[in-house]
Amino acid sequence: MRKWTSYLGPFTVLIIFVFIMEGGLYFMFPRSTKDAVPQYISQIETDLKAEQWDAARQNLQNLNLSWKKVVPIIQFHAEMDEIDDIKADIARLNGSIEAEDLGLALSELDELAEHWRNLKN
């Protein structure tokens, strides 16, 4: 009995850690509108194509807030390079929207969307 419990403790801890490390993929899918990163990306794209710069700025702020809520949850599952790339993409997208440069904004947004899709791998 004692030998059995000495194996059960470390095994249970390992199982819990595996669920935490692999459970980040579950948290990438939005559970509310506050952490819906893909929805904000598509809204910004729609705003940019219609050249509605004020709406794009507002949705970019919402995207940034949403991203800040998602990062602590997925940081165990995702690679730090991808997380840093998304953070840089948001900053560059902010600059291109402030400059109202449609081509640059759309390219940064596509790069941001690609990095988001790569987080799932």
Image: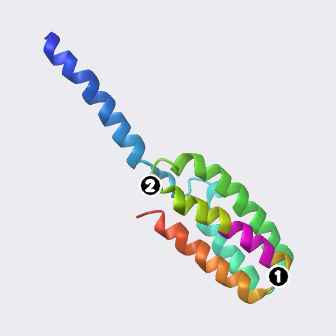
Residue of label 2: 25
Direction top: furthest residue: 2
Residue 68 % position (x, y): 67, 52
Residue 93 % position (x, y): 73, 73
Lower position in the chain sequence, tag 1 or tag 2? 2
User: Was residue 94 drawn as part of the magenta stretch in this picture?
Assistant: yes
Secondary structure under badge 2?
A: helix
Q: Contact, CB < 8 Å: mark 1 with mark 2? A: no
Residue 103 % position (x, y): 72, 89
Q: Amino acid at mark 1?
A: Gln
> Colour scheme in the image?
rainbow
Among the 4 quarters of the image, the one containing residue 54: bottom right
Q: Amino acid at mark 2?
A: Leu
Among the 4 quarters of the image, the one containing residue 65: bottom right
Most foreground residue, 2 or 95 = 95
Query: What is the magenta range?
Result: 89-96
Residue of label 1: 52
Magenta-colored segment: predominant secondary structure: helix
Among the 4 quarters of the image, the one containing residue 1: top left
Question: Distance between the Cα atoms at labels 1 and 2?
Answer: 33 Å
30 sits to left or right of 63: left
x 72%, y 85%: residue:
104
x 47%, y 47%: residue:
76
**Is the residue 40 above or below the residue 50 in the image?**
above
91 sits to left or right of 23: right
**Is the residue 75 above or below the residue 20 in the image?**
below
Numbered circle sitting on residue 44: none
**Is the residue 82 above or below the residue 7 in the image?**
below
Secondary structure under badge 1?
A: loop
**Is the residue 72 above or below the residue 4 in the image?**
below
